[in-house]
Image (tube, helix red, strand yellow):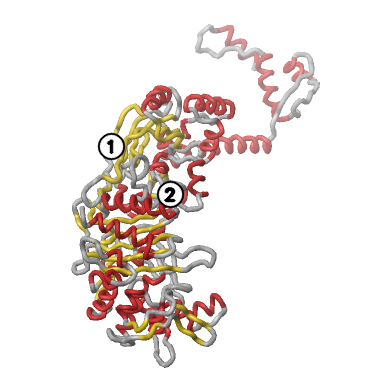
Amino acid sequence: MMGIFKNNRSRSRDPFAIQEIPERDFRLNTDRNLDWVEESFEVGGSAEVQGDRGENRRGGGKEFLGLALGQKRLTVFLFFIFGILGILFGRTAYLQIIRGTHFREMAEGNRIRTIYTAAERGIIYDRNLKVLVKNVPTFSLYLIPTDFPKDGEERASAIGNLADVTRITPKEIEEKLEEASSYSYLPIMLRENVDYEEAIRLKIESSYFPGLDLKLESRREYLSGGASTTESLSHILGYVGKVNREDLTQHADYYSTDYIGKTGLELFYEDVLRGQGGKKQVEVDALGKEKSVIAKEDPIRGKNITLTLDIEAQEKLEQIIKKHLAIAKKSRAAAIVLNPNNGEILSMISLPAFDNNLFSKGISSEEYAALINDSNHPLFNRAVMGEYPSGSTIKPVIASAALEEGIINRNTSFLSVGGLWVSSWFFPDWLAGGHGLTNVTKAIADSVNTFFYIIGGGYDKFEGLGVERIVKYAKLFGFGEKLRIDLPSEAGGFLPSEEWKEEAKGEQWYIGDTYHLAIGQGDLLVTPLQIAVSTTVFANGEALYRPHFLESVETEKVPVENYLIRENFISKENINIVRAGMRQTVTSGSAKRMFDLPVTSAAKTGTAQWSTAKPPHAWFTAFAPYENPEISVTVLVEEGEEGSRISLDIAREFMMWYFSR
């Protein structure tokens, strides 16, 4: 074979001719192939190559390090490599195909954001279109957590710098950041009601600070408080505040930057006053600052509402009550003025009151603690939340029930000698020696307890109403349940029963319990609002209306029929008998000092015992003019002693002003 290659080489230099292959190279290639099949070495092993083959391969039989793989190891190795590649390809497909949209949206979210724009709240007017609540511009400072540094040292440094810029302590900033997710786009409020000069400085500073955003907003400004004398409006209007976690769970369409009504009409008519928020899609830079607006949806402002309230009457009644409280050295009172023909509230006073602008501007912990710890409880609306024994102001209701049930008539009379004896128990009248022969009109005018003991619980052979019928008629007049006034937290009062006493006290019902109930004492509890509303039935002669503040929304008036609770549940004849008794209260009874009003009036006084150690509460309720009533007035002075004094004086002075203006 070698000869052939040599001859070919010698005969021709043709490049296409078969060339001679050196013997050494041929043997080397052949031997390598044989060695690969026949021999294997472990990794890191060594071997001495023997024979001509070994010498030709390694050059003299020198030792060397080698690596060879068997078939099984090669298969495992290839499976391992392909497995890793499969995982990498699978993960890539998952991220780019399955989760691709999500990550694209995230990336886009870093550049394009949707910002919520709050709507301006509706304005609140009194019946003469005087503004009671308005919106004033204000600046608020926010921080967007996702734009704020998240690493330890960088974050700590940023908090320190932010504290210097915003003049907020680092601890406060940390606490606010801990309440939100670090990747949240929802802004955190750092400061509100920032003044104009401070806002200019913060606007400049915020331009270079990641996540810091100064916004122009509006806050509520109330007529009550401050230089105004009508702080009692605070209980009516209420106030708004930032939404909290509880608000957000109850209102899914609210944002953490929203304000919401917390008390009063602001809370009750939240859905009307709030309006509808807008949105805008903006492009932001690396610091989260708005660069351009891509799309925009304008907010829809809240609707304005007009109240039945007469702010002049509110101011005057508050002034009068404060004056008389100061003279008598008292501090707590409530009063309500109604239109008896439709349930409109012209004035409502609860003293002491508070400045609701404190809450609107952001009340301090010290200011809030002072209100909470005040023993007179200025945040408590006594007119609708206070529950008291009614005293004699419930006697017109008891008289109506007895007349309607046929137990008595206009001429039924009893002899009042100063009280009643039942076994060893004595139930006194307020006048020693009694009032003599008394019919229903005189019993109302002079507030004769003996008469109402008898018609309420019976005496000797005379059968009275009994507790069940008293409760039945009391409910018809609005007692024992909420009247559904358009204010939150209304109390319903309490009407006792035989079953209740047995369950609650483990005692049976006695005749004395019925006697006490018939004169507005014992376990009976009523609100000033309930006394005021029951009085309107005798004023208008037929109907019970739901008391309310809302007159109209924008220009749409609320029909008076919407406020009718019930009517004609007492006959006109019997209503007129009770009206005559209330008129006699003014002409010759316990409210004779009302007689000099410029119009005719009817009234009922009340003195409610509630403690053996403290003075009784003073009640007074009246309506005028008697023939064609325009208003009814109810006054309660806590621990005011007698209703025929301080409470009557307050109502008299107010009605004198009202009918003389």
Residue 379 sits above or below residue 182 on the image: below
Quarter of the image for residue 362 reads: top left
Measured as percent of width and height from the top left, residue 411 is found at: 28, 86
Residue 584 sits above or below residue 304 on the image: below
Question: N-terminal of the two: label 2 or label 1?
Answer: 2
In the image: residue 654, left or right of residue 207: left
Residue hosting label 1: 296
Measured as percent of width and height from the top left, residue 307 is found at: 26, 53
Residue 223 sits above or below residue 412 on the image: above
Front position in the image: 12 or 323? 323
Residue 264 visible, this angle:
no
Q: What residue is at 42 percent from the left and 87 percent from the top? A: 458
- Per the model, the C-alpha gap separating discs 2 and 1 is 25 Å
10 Å crowding of disc 1: few (<14), some (14-19), many (20+): some
Q: What residue is at 51 percent from the left and 78 percent from the top? A: 501
Which dot, 2 or 1, sits closer to the camera?
Answer: 2
Q: What residue is at 66 percent from the left and 17 percent from the top? A: 26
Name of the residue lying farthest toward the bottom: 461
Q: Are marks 2 and 1 in contact (CB under 8 Å)?
A: no
Amino acid type, label 1: Lys
Amino acid type, label 2: Leu
Residue hosting label 2: 248
Residue 580 visible, this angle:
yes
Q: What residue is at 29 percent from the left and 72 percent from the top? A: 588
Measured as percent of width and height from the top left, residue 143 is found at: 45, 33
Quarter of the image for residue 631 reads: bottom left
For mark 1, give the secondary structure.
Answer: strand
Quadrant containing the N terminus is top right
In the image: residue 327, left or right of residue 177: left
